[in-house]
Image (spheres, rainbow, N blue to C red):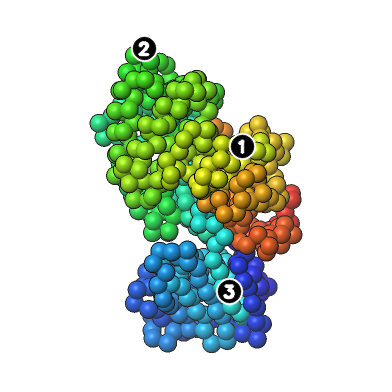
Amino acid sequence: MPALRQLGDVIPLPAAVRPDSAGNFRIPADVSVTATPAAEDIAEQLVELLRRVTGRPVSRADGGSFRVLLEGSDDNGPLTEAYGLEIDRESVTLRAASNQGLFLALQTLRQLLPEERTTGEIILPGGRIDDQPRFAYRGTMLDLARHFFAPAEIRSYIDSIVQFKINHLHLHLTDDQGWRLEIPGWPRLTEVSGGAGTGVDGAGPGFLTAWEYADLVEYAASRYVTIVPEIDMPGHVNAAQVAYPELTRDGNPVGPRTDAEVGYSSLVADKERTYEFVEDVIRELAAMTPGPYLHIGGDEAFSTPPEDYRVFMSRVLPMAGKYGKQPIGWHEMAAVDLPPNAIPQYWRIEPADDGVARAAADGHQVIMSPADRSYLDMKYDDQTPLGLDWAGLVGVERSYDWDPADRLPGVGEEALLGVEAPLWSETLRSIADVQFMAFPRLAAIAEIGWTPRERRNWPSFRARVGAFGPRWTAQGVTFHRSPEIDWAE
């Protein structure tokens, strides 16, 4: 193993780190794992991790040198993700009140271990970590509508993001270019608008069957990631109207769109067929989604008159609650009266937004995703071959050096559910493109969402993310070697 990592050399930086160099732990040849019975799944994951990095058998035994302890009960409260990690000369202990907390402890431990098998002695730095997140919601979004990514690619992305304690994956499933999720009763949505020639430039057709979506949801849940599905409306609906012209105002067919323009399509607010369609989609999506959230879009509805937008949202937002879900929407929806549990997601670059501030004052929680800081599809610099630049160039330091509690007047710490880093796919064509645009910036957003504000600083993050580079390389992740970072080899 290279030079001994320090206890706090992980991403995101833990809430409290107390190193003890006298407690460094040398992994023995006869390494073993013990666990409380309810933590068997995490214990088996630890066994596999130790087998991979040591190349040796790892046994399960009482009194093992690695201990996985499920202790206490938080009843799914604010400490669900809290954990402790203790390393001394005799043992390594992962401790939490939930299996989710133990899983997160395992992600921290993973970063202290080699990424690849090593034949040399493995030493873990001694001390204690006591950790819990700043915000409950730490997310990223992947746009499947402008370019479709297959289930295996999405699973790969999930595996990459959980290392940084990202716990929500928002899937943008529908837009003007394509409809990417099978909806029973409306087969042409995917037969027509998920088929060949859909996607920006006609590149990237495909869709998730109901079974594939359920399998993805289950895969994510096994890694404590909640899938947040989005059906964007009343705008961004050309793909739906191509499949079902009855959803247009005059019932006449519209042509498919493979450009990247926005704001030209709209569902019809005074047509009952609109709400039959929308309720069918929301009901089916809610039934397929065990997580608490449905994202209903609501952005860039430029061709929807303001009064029609208000009427549409007043009828559609309560449908999420009718089917047991909490609605999230892009922050434009905050211009209308919101159901009590609705969550606006701020995405623009302006320094203030009256609607979001009013929603926060009324007790609504807010997800912060300002495009000039958190949009992963923005170019890193003017030489970046992928991405857009309408929100400016967003380097790694710019992604890191801001705070969501300062972003909008009237939207302070207490109003924030968390942060999310969206990745729109107009310029993407492969999972390697996704990785290149996401990393290292998603690691920066993850630390903003997890680490106490007073513990974060750019020089520390810059050093830790530079040291992470060889791990991405070993994992086969195509990350951006930003010149802002001194990358370890």
Label 2 – label 1 distance at C-alpha: 35 Å
Residue identifier under label 2: 250
Q: Reading the chain from its start, which is encountered first: label 2 or label 1?
A: 2
Circle 2 SS class? loop
Under circle 3, the secondary element is strand
Going by the numbered disc 1, the residue's amino acid type is Asp
Residue 156 vs residue 352, the one in the foreground: 352
Residue on which the image places disc 3: 129
Image disc number at residue 353 = 1
Position of the N terminus, as image quadrant, is bottom right
Q: For the point 62% across and 62% down, which residue is it?
A: 452
Q: Nearer the viewer, mark 2 or mark 3?
A: 2
Q: Which tag is nearer the camera, tag 2 or tag 1?
A: 1
Residue 398 percent coordinates (x, y): 70, 47
The answer to which image quadrant residue 97 occupies is bottom left
The residue that appears at 52% across and 84% down in the rendered structure is 91
Q: Is residue 351 left or right of residue 86?
A: right
Q: Where in the figure is residue 37, as x and y percent of width and height?
A: 34, 77
Tell me which residue sits at (64%, 77%) in the image.
18
Residue 287, x across and y down, in percent? 29, 44
| Residue 459 visible in the picture | yes
Residue reaching furthest to the front? 362
For badge 3, the amino acid type reads: Ile
For the C terminus, the image quarter is: bottom right
